Amino acid sequence: MVTSVTAYPIAPEPSAIPASLFNVCFVLFVINASYFPTAYFSHWWIYDPNGLGIPTDFVNVWAAGRLALDGHPAQAWDWDIQKQLEVALLGQDFIGHFAWHYPPPFLFVATLLAQFPYAVAFIGWVSVSFAPYLAVMRAIVGRPFGLVLAVAFPIVLNNTLVGQNGFLTAALIGGTLVLMPARPVLAGICLGLLTYKPQYGLLFPIVLIAASQWTVFFTAAIVAGLMALASWLAFGTESWQAFFHWMPMFSQAFLTEGKATFWKLQSIFALVRFLGGTEQLAWIFQWIMTGSVAVALALMWRSRVRYQLKAAGLAAGTLLITPYLFMYDMMVLAIAVAFLVRIGLTSGFRRYELAALGCALGLILGFIFFGAPLGLFATLIVTALIARRAGPWWRREPAPPLLSAASA
């Protein structure tokens, strides 16, 4: 009986890091690492030169936590009440809403953060959620270079600037994938915690069933159930009622009316709407994409493709199947890229791979300047690299047990 298996063995003679890859990552590493101290003291981040809070996403987390601490958790989903508290906190009004739309279990995080002053909570949240993301990226790449790659990923700037939860989402998905071969219970815990953003866990049941990973499957289900129960006990039935009552309004605002503007969403749904297509047409394209990715991943996870490629495919696939994908959640793409980098450092990069990754990087950086959902094309490039590495996996024999496949 195998009791301990290393999912990602170190290659006897790992290849050197290509100079072009290291140089690009190092430059981005320096930019990201130096920007936020400079931005904070220059009043570009969190507070403006007048000492007023800069309106941005994190304000909805702090405000929701404050409402829960004050005994009114269900009001966190009320846009008008939430905005009144946000305006009072920031000291200035703003156009639109920074609405709270997470399931009640995420209120545990919000209530913890709301016990601190706003700036402390903002910086603390970004810093604490960044730590597991760094650890996961280091584990996937298998070298200290994983830390450089993690900090260099361009979405780091976007996620940190608005105080979003992209680091946590990437850490939980990456943690699930890196732990699954040898530590299925821990992998299931990570996956269960991911239910705070359920749209990014939809593919996991499909691949877990396809790969017969029942320990991960049932552990995740138990953790998700316990989180729901705990939030019900802590925040009451009204919080769940409010969540389901306001959910259609969020869908109407973001996917039908485009109140957040479609260029900020990085899905095929948003691209169709951005180009002037109707909502019905956008849903047709989105469902075709979602169904194709789900079927492909189910077949891939039953095949003999090496585990790292399966994991990379699943990370990229989570971004392709949801219409509701803001740029900060594309932190998950870093997980897919890290698996590809590990393969390249272990067995050598193919001649086109670094150039293709450079194009994906350029598209992500260009998102801000061109005001278009270019992140979708970055995800498609990474997905194409994964598929090319996997080869004709649909013709291969059924996969061996996952512990063996992980070492392939």
Image (spheres, rainbow, N blue to C red):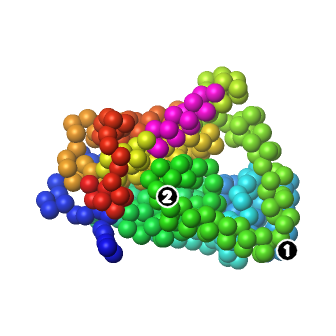
Cα–Cα gap, marks 1 and 2: 32 Å
Q: Which residue does the image show at 41% across and 65% down from the upper left? A: 179
Circle number at residue 71: 1
- Mark 2 residue element: helix
Relative image position of residue 190 (x, y in whole percent): 52, 66
Is residue 224 rendered to the left or right of residue 175? right
Rate crowding at label 2 as few (under 14), some (14 to 19) or many (20 or more) other CA atoms within 10 Å: many
Q: On the image, which quarter does residue 194 sit in?
A: bottom right
Looking at the picture, does residue 241 appear above or below residue 279? below
The amino acid pointed to by label 2 is Ile
Q: Which residue does the image show at 55% across and 53% down from the upper left? A: 205
Majority secondary structure of the magenta segment? helix
Relative image position of residue 346 (x, y in whole percent): 21, 54
Q: Which residue is mark 2?
A: 173
Rate crowding at label 1 as few (under 14), some (14 to 19) or many (20 or more) other CA atoms within 10 Å: few
The amino acid pointed to by label 1 is Gly
Q: Which residues are magenta?
A: 284-298
